[in-house]
Amino acid sequence: MNLIVIMELLFAMVTGLSFVGCKQKQEASISIKEAYAGKFVVGTALNTQQSSGIDTAAIQVVLHNFNAITAENCMKSEVIHPAKNRYDFSQSDMFVDFGLKNNLFIVGHTLVWHSQTAPWMFVDGKGSYVCRDTLINRMKSHIYTVVGRYKGKVNGWDVVNEAIDDSAGLRNSLWMKIIGSDYIELAFKYAHEADPDAELYLNDYNLYQPGKRNVAIKLAKSIQEKGLRIDAIGEQAHYGLNPNVVTALESSIKAFAETGLKVVITELDVSVLPFPTKKITAEVSLEYENKPGFNPFANAMPDSISLKQSEMYQSLFRLFLKQKNTIERVTFWGVNDEQSWRNDWPIKGRTDYALLFDRDNKPKTCVHELIGIAATDGQKEISFQKN
Ligand code: XIL
């Protein structure tokens, strides 16, 4: 071993940094969950590969860094309740067992949504839409069965997902069309009856936008006024490299806090790729063609972009720290860049870098920055790079 290598090793031991070749690669010395302990819980969504134990590398990242998990897909009705008289709990049981075994805060996602709902739910044997009473009964039985199975095990449920559309009206989903707007309060009622101890969330995207923010507050208030349980508003937080979002989000968090509700950041990711339309949405049904220029970092993320992403994440976490009395949990939508849904949405087959851990499950530099700002409680200022 020559002197330089010995000195590098000594430096690495002291600072927690390690070197790969001449390129500095950082390994996190303390974990994200430790850094944010006492402030808010930090979670991640798990896919089936992870909760089943197959993806051992990702599991190590999860156990080291996070203390909450959300089911990415396995509790959605098309998976868990694929036919009228058939439930399939094989994946969701594994997910819940993983959480229990590792003492994690377990979030069920999601009970009532317009997307990934098993198609049988809305139709009769002849393919016609069922009536209001039938759909209410089906919803009730679905919620009782799923929430009831995990009573005392799942800590919180995303009860209704994306009830508000992009123009800040109530989404005209089949739930809404067939039942009417009271499907929302009924879902909260049934979820609470099925597990009185579980936290219940109203989850949506782009709640930093004033229009959606106001409708979410109205909905939450009307649930509260009916004496029903609702614990928090969930902001999905599927973002891009847009620092303006952070300022707007702060106004929403403060407005939600005024209703007495907590806020959970439920599906955080920061895409570094161009969004194909001017209007930013997180509507899952959208799919655009992969035109030239839309997949600019197919081989690697340039350092300048990596820096911008880190700044965006830092800015968000400084806000979360500032609002830590309102924010209960911040959950990332996936463990590493390889598995992130942002590679396929809103354009299929791109290479995105939306999360904190790279395709080899290595922490990005940003992880160290986030750990650092937790230590200063978000006080250290950073300035954004100009485009
Ligand atoms: C996404 C999953 O990550 C994908 O694997 C799946 O193909 C589509 O759904 N809002 C939500 C999540 O509430 O359930 C979505 O998850 C992402 C957008």
Image (cartoon, rainbow, N blue to C red):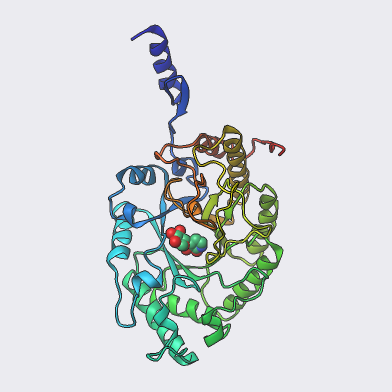
Outermost top residue = 3
Residue at point 45%, 86% (across, down): 135
How many labels, in total? 0
Quadrant of the frame with the N terminus? top left
Is 170 located above or below residue 271 in the figure? Answer: below
Is 88 located above or below residue 349 in the figure? Answer: below
In this picture, residue 126 sits left or right of residue 88: right
In this picture, residue 108 sits left or right of residue 371: left
User: Residue 40 at x, y = what percent?
Assistant: 51, 50
In this picture, residue 204 sits left or right of residue 56: right
Outermost front residue = 292
In this picture, residue 118 sits left or right of residue 286: left
Q: Quadrant of residue 182?
A: bottom right
Is 129 located above or below residue 343 in the figure? Answer: below
Residue at point 67%, 36% (across, down): 381
Q: Quadrant of residue 138?
A: bottom left
- Frontmost residue, 318 versus 341: 341
- Frontmost residue, 262 versus 179: 179
Is 21 located above or below residue 342 in the figure? Answer: above
User: Residue 249 at x, y = what percent?
Assistant: 66, 55
User: Residue 98 at x, y = what percent?
Assistant: 30, 55
Residue at point 32%, 61% (across, down): 96
Quadrant of the frame with the C terminus? top right
User: Residue 235 at x, y = what percent?
Assistant: 57, 60
